[in-house]
Image: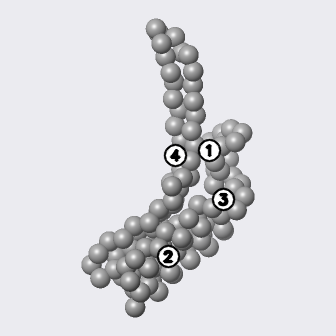
Amino acid sequence: MKTRRDFLRQGGMAAAAVAAAGAFNPAGAMTNLVSVREGAAEMPPEDTVRELMMAALNTARSAGASYSDVRIGRYRNSIVFTREQQIVNTADTDSIGAGVRALVDGTWGFGATKT
């Protein structure tokens, strides 16, 4: 049986693989729902995401997890800077990240990407 440390390391690597899934392209329906500006983080193709998520879940199961899940989050923020009731600057940020959560022998483990 693998140690919890090995499991977390493998889960973290699987989460990183989900986030770094090659060239990002907007998924079909996603382009209809949101306007994606140039240089924005875009979701990888659905098939690629599904394969990587299944790899993370299979790794967790083979490491002895009784429960595991993978989640992907896209975070978009718009910031407006003002001074004396005037807008002086605006900034938009966009990031995509992934996390893997697992329950092994009654103990929760979590691994995530930085971005």
Compare marks 4 and 2 and give the one earlier in the sequence: 2
From mark 4 to mark 2, how far is it between C-alphas? 25 Å
Residue 35: where, in percent of width, then height?
66, 39
Which residue sits furthest top? 84
* Left or right side of 108 for 25: right
The secondary element bearing badge 2 is classed as helix
Identify which residue, 114 or 22, lies in the foreground. 114
- The residue pinned by badge 4 equals 75
Task: State the mark number for residue 10.
Answer: 2
User: Eyeballing the image, is 6 above or below 87?
Assistant: below
Compare marks 2 and 1 and give the one earlier in the sequence: 2
* Left or right side of 69 for 26: right
The secondary element bearing badge 4 is classed as strand
Name the image quarter holding residue 38. Answer: top right
Q: Amino acid at mark 2?
A: Gln
Say few, some or many: other residues with alpha carbon within 10 Å of mark 4 (under 14 / 14 to 19 / 20 or more).
Answer: few
The secondary element bearing badge 3 is classed as loop
Compare marks 2 and 3 and give the one earlier in the sequence: 2
Identify which residue, 102 or 112, lies in the foreground. 112
- Please report the residue visible at 38 percent of the width from the left and 83 percent of the height from the top: 3
User: Eyeballing the image, is 43 above or below 17?
Assistant: above
Image depth: mark 4 or mark 2 in front: 2
Task: State the mark number for residue 44.
Answer: 3
Q: Amino acid at mark 3?
A: Pro
From mark 2 to mark 1, how far is it between C-alphas? 34 Å
The secondary element bearing badge 1 is classed as helix
User: Eyeballing the image, is 74 above or below 86?
Assistant: below
- The residue pinned by badge 1 equals 33
Residue 73: where, in percent of width, then height?
50, 54
From mark 4 to mark 3, how far is it between C-alphas? 15 Å
